[in-house]
Amino acid sequence: MRIRVRAPKRLSGTVQVPGDKSISHRAALFGAIASGRTEITGYLEGEDCLNTLTAVRALGALVTRKGPGHYLVDGAGLSGLREPDQVIDCGNSGTTARLLMGVLAGQPFWTFLTGDDSLRRRPMKRVVEPLTRMGATVVGREDGSRLPLGVRGARPLRAIAHDSPVASAQVKTALLLAGLWADGPVTVTEPVRSRDHTERMLRGFGARLSVDGTTVTLTPGAELRGPCVAVPGDISSAAFLLVAGTIARGAEIAVTGVGVNPTRAGLLDALEWMGAPVGRSHAALAAGEPVADLTTRSATLRCAVVGAPMIPRLIDEVPILAVAACMAQGRTRITDAAELRVKESDRIRSIAAALGKLGARITEAHDGLDIEGGARLRGATVQSGGDHRIAMALCVAGLVAEGETIVEDTECIGTSYPGFVETVNALADAPCVEELP
């Protein structure tokens, strides 16, 4: 599928975005190993999160859909998961695969995981290595570093203190989940703090967990009990609309009910540094997560330098931040982001190549991007590389480019933002984004 984009005369209005992808994954997985019922509202019904629901069903949890985004997960408890009778397909979801490995490390049976072409290329060693030190057995391609993989867990697992060389919420979560079946406390220390959805939600399920700076410790022994989880809007999805509202002429956009967890909200800070008038109102807490309505309007942006420790707080938003930087005054430098090279695509290379084709003055660095703002973007045919965040970022760039932009290979958008095209058109004075066969 392709998407054709033309610049609208105006973007304005108030919209909602789908539920947070990271929180949705965790709610389903934690519910599966809890006792009792977890009721989830606002669940993201994108392909990645639906794959997580399929996975927990295969392991013995009962999942009931009550309505759009509304699910009941009747968990099997810490001792009740069962060996699946088929290979679990994680699709394109690295979160599903890596977090699930943490759960499987504590299960005394074999489970086999695979994924699509993209996921089978992504590295798994940073999760596999500490899980094998805890006592799990992992076999698979390239010495157990890439899918397909087989995992056989053990009980009890050995307690470890793991120093992670990179800030990775997926690694941290996998080890904390494995720690539920360990013979003592499991500790994960990161160089800087990664997103803390796991810590917040595990506490809500009743786990014994402590945080000291960038060190998180889980002490096993507590029973998890299923709560009600209200998933807020995904800030990574809202990012595309907020940047569009900042760079399009005459725009004024509000996005309601967005999760603004400070370990995830780095894009908001970066846009404010660049001069965007980002507003927050109606702040509240939902399932332990801060939530707010966000607004922005057209602004003249200035350049910025974005690097550690900001990068872990906006790692998924770098492609759309690069689009904003194209429209800013001066040279923006994004650094310390080498992790982007092992996402659904090499996002550094992909966004640099595609925005360059649109006329941006953008240079790829080994760990980031240099962007000289102010170049006039002109419509062209560009490639998403099957990466949902690249595809949506290019659609936003097309909203401010002269002429017509064609973004190819856009089926991937459904992994995180079903309804993206409809949302953008709802903000425009006339339809400006069109799906093509």
Image (tube, rainbow, N blue to C red):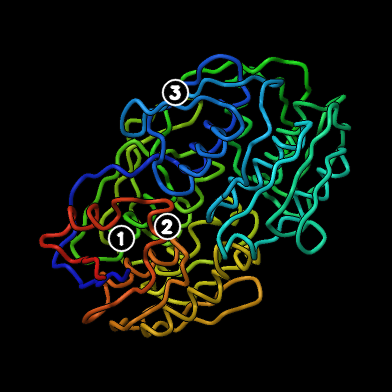
Label 1: which residue?
246
- Say whether residue 336 is visible: no
Q: Is residue 57 left or right of residue 298?
A: right
Q: Amino acid at mark 1?
A: Thr
CB under 8 Å between discs 1 and 3:
no
Label 3: which residue?
72
Q: Residue at x 45, y 39 (%)?
A: 260
Give how far across and how far down residue 159 sits, in percent.
Answer: 87, 32
The Cα–Cα distance between marks 1 and 2, rounded to whole angstroms, is 9 Å
Quadrant of the snapshot with the N terminus = bottom left
The Cα–Cα distance between marks 2 and 3, rounded to whole angstroms, is 37 Å
Q: Amino acid at mark 2?
A: Leu
Label 2: which residue?
271
Sequence-first tag of 1 and 2: 1
Give how far across and how far down residue 353 sits, in percent.
Answer: 48, 81
CB under 8 Å between discs 1 and 2:
yes
Front tag of 2 and 3: 3
Question: Tag 2's secondary structure?
Answer: helix
